[in-house]
Amino acid sequence: MSMKDMMPNFELYQPASVDNALDLLEQFGADGWPLAGGQDSYDWFKDRAKKPRAVIDLNGISELRGIKETAEGVEIGALTTLTEVINNDIIKAQYGLLASAASRVASPQIRNMGTIGGNLCQDTRCWYYRYGLDCYRAGGNTCYADTPQGMNREHCLYEADRCVAVSPSDTATAVVALDGSMVIRNKSGEKVVKAEEFFVLPAVDIIHMTILKPGDLLTAIRLPKTWAGARFYFEKVADRNTWDFALVNISAALKVNNGTIEDARMVCGGIQCTPKRLTVVEDIIKGSPQNEETAELAGKSASRGATPLNYNHFKVPLMENLVKRAIRSA
Amino acid sequence: MVAASKENFIVNDKSAVLAPDKLIRHVRLARLLHWLMAICVLVLLTTSLLPIAEIKFSWVTLHWVTGLILAVTALTHILWSLFRTRIRQMVFGLRDMQDAVRTLLWFFRISGQEPAKPGKYSPAQKLIHHGFAVTILASIVTGLLMMVKVDTPLWERNPYWLSNASWGIIYIIHDLASMLLVTMIMLHIYFAFRPEKRLYLRSMVLGWISRSEYASHHDPTRWENK
Amino acid sequence: MEILRYSSNAWGQKALEGLSWDLLWVFFSIGAVFIVLHALYMWLLPPKKTS
């Protein structure tokens, strides 16, 4: 990899409808690259680490934009920008968790261009992988991060299986916490997949972050009414308050009645290759009062099973403290 | 023929009389090791090749654990063969080469002269055994080297233990061995189920062949004297 | 069809990764073809043993 900031040649297609886009995605298969806001894609192209033959620009497809209320909840078009999500009245009123998460993504300029679909589908930010090295995720036979000398400060605590990269998406934790679903279309039809099942661990598929295959298109994200209006907490800890990806982030949705936590969904990002649902914490706090004692107990149990790498031990107390704060402050 | 006794029955490889019309071709330990290795190889090939065919599942841990079991089983087989059985039965020599050529000429009707009856193992059986031995040993050795990339309580994973070029060679040997195994297993299973060879499949399951099969398929002097 | 798989190492040099998985179909096909031909031969023109 010798030259940066100069994209390799590709054929650009700008379909005007989802059907047209699906035709193109099927035609080009693994050689096709669906382009939304481009905030992830252009980095790859400029670094010449990914060189698709065809780029399918989805920005002309209006049916992929917009937020609408449905009988079951709300449906967000995958090409809706993060700024649109943040400013939408329905999202702010009922699904504030997603608005909070989206508002912490990168920078205002990136949020204006970046889409929620792209934020959910984005590739991992492991610097070895992003540099274009031949690691397992890139189809090679090694992992540079998980070695005695590897710089793995921002890598995972859980489910390290040959690859120790993490899920960088802030909105992913919120969508999982809100029990969202992803609407995926291809030439064979449409399927709806729970957000938790949308993301893939490296043990199952080391090359992809999501279950999307060549020819698939994420068209919408659906949030059910189940968690609408619940108590929410989102916090992202990063080196800088803007632009940086999360070291650890947390999305929490709690249903509290008379001071007792009736139900909870808590999801952590930045600690695993997928958004990690903290089911142990959820089980502990359900039926417990929302107080300091519950928060302490939950915090201690949150990091159970963590296996830090050489340089990311700080993520363990960080994760515990974020869980405590989520329970206290939701 | 040596009469079968309880001690001999497990490990003694002399062709013992099991019953008036049956004799042992493979003792229990031999059959156990064969089937254990067969299951291991099939699990190893399945776990490694299905993900390549886009059938995704968590395969890596199952793969290397099975690989370690195969390594121990293969080592047991090798040591047992070296020290407790007549290893000369499996040696492919000049006479086997001549028999193999004669078999091919007779098979393709180039010559009318039937090949001589073999000892315990025909030239083809010896060749498939040696083929499996080479490919399985190659995959075990390269696989054991790859274990340095797995975090265990005994060592921390370190891919830099070997250079990129060395890893490339190791992966090529491992990949080639696995692909050759696909072909050989297909042929091995096919021949095991062929009607004229099914006695050998039975002998690997139940241990015995009949006296008439022994007489018609083998030369007793070549079987016993090796 | 490729025989070998390559990638770039940390210095941008071509590094050997392994055999191409396209070869798997070659090895599978060799086995399948052998089985089919042998089975047909044994069915149509089986060599006869006299002893």
Image (tube, coloured by chain):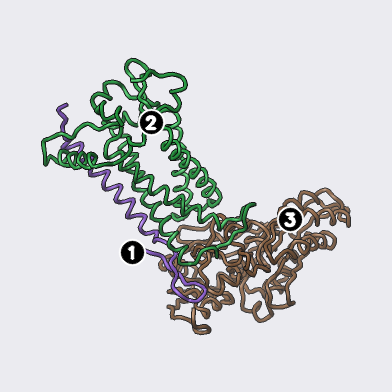
Chain colours: A brown, B green, C purple
Q: Is residue A91 above or below residue B182?
A: below
Task: Determine which residue is flagged by label 3.
Answer: A265
Identify the residue at image location x=43%, y=69%. A31
**Horizontal and vertical percent for residue B145?**
50, 55
Task: Determine which residue is flagged by label 1.
Answer: C1
Q: Is residue A128 above or below residue A288?
A: below
Camera-nearest label, 3 or 1:
1
The residue lying furthest to the top in this view is B20
For the residues marked 2 and 3, what is the alpha-carbon distance in whole angstroms?
56 Å
Q: In front here: B32 or A111? A: B32
Q: Confirm whether residue A195 shows in the render.
A: yes
Q: What element does badge 2 sit on?
A: helix
Which disc number belongs to residue B204? 2
Identify the residue at image location x=44%, y=43%. B42
Mark 3 neighbour class, 10 Å CA radius: few under 14, some 14 to 19, many 20 or more: many
Q: Chain letter of disc 3?
A: A
Mark 1 neighbour class, 10 Å CA radius: few under 14, some 14 to 19, many 20 or more: few
For the residues marked 1 and 2, what is the alpha-carbon distance in whole angstroms?
40 Å
Task: Verify CB contact (< 8 Å) between mark 1 and mark 2.
Answer: no
Which disc number belongs to residue C19? none
